[in-house]
Structure formats: structure tokens, C-alpha cells
Amino acid sequence: MYQTEFKKRVRYAETDKMGYLYYGNYAKYYEIGRVEALRELGLSYRKMEDVMQILLPVLSLETRYRLPAYYDDEITIITQLRELPIKLFSFYHELYNPAGKVINTANVKLFCVDLKTNKRVDCPEVLIDKLKPYFE
């Protein structure tokens, strides 16, 4: 299993009238987790797009809201790949409040698309090679 951790503070502009992190903004936190997880492997979305000519569209997003996050909370984003991606990525996310309680969980599935042909392709070998040690 591959796992990363990243912290992000809830901004005022991300909250609703009650001071809660607006439910529609949680997907941005998942994206932050995914981007930083790939960055820790030495890959970036920019490199995947510009050099590898791969796009990663979202196939599905399943989320569960457990507790609210509040303005100015520092949220810990745990991102996991529990299976080695071959045809698609399943990113599992857990968001924790400053007290260490799980406030939200999600599973976001993405697949690879060739930038030029706009057709679905397998995950790039370079990415699989970087992830293999975490799954042995």
C-alpha cells in the first residue's frame, strides 16, 4: 500500500454561512491529496500531461461526511493507493481534524487517457515501477 499525508488549512472562502467547510469543496482536498501523492513519487500532473501525454479524468467519487471541518482548522489529508494501478487508480482519502478525528472519507477512481488520441490507456510503466515496491 502506498500512503501519503498532507496538511491544509480551511480557508474562509471555502466555508459556508455556518463556518463549516462547504461540502462541495471536499473534492478539492482529495485532489490536493492525489497531486501531492504523485509528487512524492517524483511525478507531477504537469509532467504526466506535458511529457508523458497522459490525462487522468475522474471516473467516480464516493464520499462520506462524518464530522464538519471549520474555518481555520488544519486538516490532515491521508491519501492511499491500496492496489497497484494497472487500468485505473483508486485513491482512498481520509480527512482528519486537528483533534485527530476522521471527518470525511472518500474513494476517487481515475483512469488514464492518451492526450493525443483521447483514448483510454493503461497506467504508465514509469508510475507502476515507482509504486511496485510499496506492494511487494
Image (cartoon, rainbow, N blue to C red):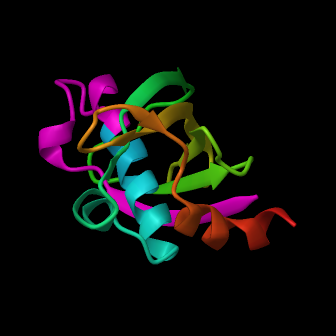
46 with respect to 102 (left or right): left
Nearer-the-camera pick, 105 or 113: 113
- Looking at the image, can residue 82 be seen? yes
The quarter of the rendered structure image containing the N terminus is bottom right
Residue 119 image position (x, y, % from top left) = 37, 31
The quadrant where residue 89 appears: top right
Nearer-the-camera pick, 87 or 15: 87
Nearer-the-camera pick, 61 or 68: 61
Nearer-the-camera pick, 44 or 94: 44
71 with respect to 95 (left or right): left
| Residue 52 inside the magenta-drawn segment | no
Give the magenta part as a residue range. 1-27
The quarter of the rendered structure image containing the C terminus is bottom right
Above or below for 60 versus 10: above
Name of the residue lying farthest toward the front? 117
Residue 20 image position (x, y, % from top left) = 30, 32
Residue at (51% x, 49% y) in the render: 97
- Looking at the image, can residue 74 be seen? no
Residue at (31% x, 41% y) in the render: 28
Name of the residue lying farthest toward the right? 136
